[in-house]
Image (tube, rainbow, N blue to C red):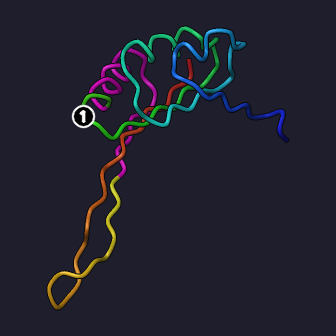
Amino acid sequence: MDHRLTVTEGSAPQALADLPRPDAIFLGGGGDAKVMQSLWQSLHPGARLVANAVTLETESLLTQWHGLHGGSLMRVEIAHAATLGRMRGWQSSRPLVQWSVTR
């Protein structure tokens, strides 16, 4: 099944410039306006984009794109049990914001 997934390493959007138009893009994080615009332009109608954010700046960007293009905007927060004095309590991890859309 190697033909179903291609991993491209490099800095976006330069590393993506000569690639064929994808059916789906997964952005793990670190997106900015220039990267989002480049990724959006590379999608053909019916292609899917899933983008993650953990910073306020990227979360704001995904919120803007959600407002413009719809899709699903989700925030996931996870906490783990940890020692709290003689007992245990919840220790929160950084929340993740995910936007997924089909163009």
Chain part drawn in magenta: 59-76
Q: Position of residue 56 (x, y in %)?
A: 24, 34
Q: Is residue 92 above or below residue 87?
A: above
**Magenta region, mostly helix, strand or loop?**
helix
Q: Quadrant of residue 65?
A: top left
Identify the image quadrant of the N terminus.
Answer: top right
| Relative side of 6 to 80, left or right | right
| Relative side of 87 to 97, left or right | left
Camera-side residue of 53 and 64: 53
Q: Position of residue 85 (x, y in %)?
A: 14, 85
Identify the image quadrant of the C terminus.
Answer: top right
Instruction: Please identify the residue farthest to the bottom as the structure is shown.
Output: 86
What residue is drawn where x is 37% and y is 20%?
A: 32
Q: Position of residue 41 (x, y in %)?
A: 54, 8
Q: Is residue 82 above or below residue 46?
A: below
Instruction: Please identify the residue farthest to the front as the structure is shown.
Output: 10
Q: Quadrant of residue 66?
A: top left
Instruction: Please identify the residue farthest to the left as the structure is shown.
Output: 85
Q: Amino acid at mark 1?
A: Leu
Label 1: how many residues lie within 10 Å, few (<14), some (14-19) or many (20+)? few
What residue is drawn where x is 36% and y is 40%?
A: 97
Camera-side residue of 25 and 72: 25
> Mark 1 highlights which residue?
56
What residue is drawn where x is 22% and y is 77%?
A: 89
| Element marked by disc 1 | helix
Q: Is residue 28 magenta?
A: no
What residue is drawn where x is 62% and y is 29%?
A: 9
Q: Position of residue 69 (x, y in %)?
A: 42, 17
Q: Quadrant of residue 14?
A: top right
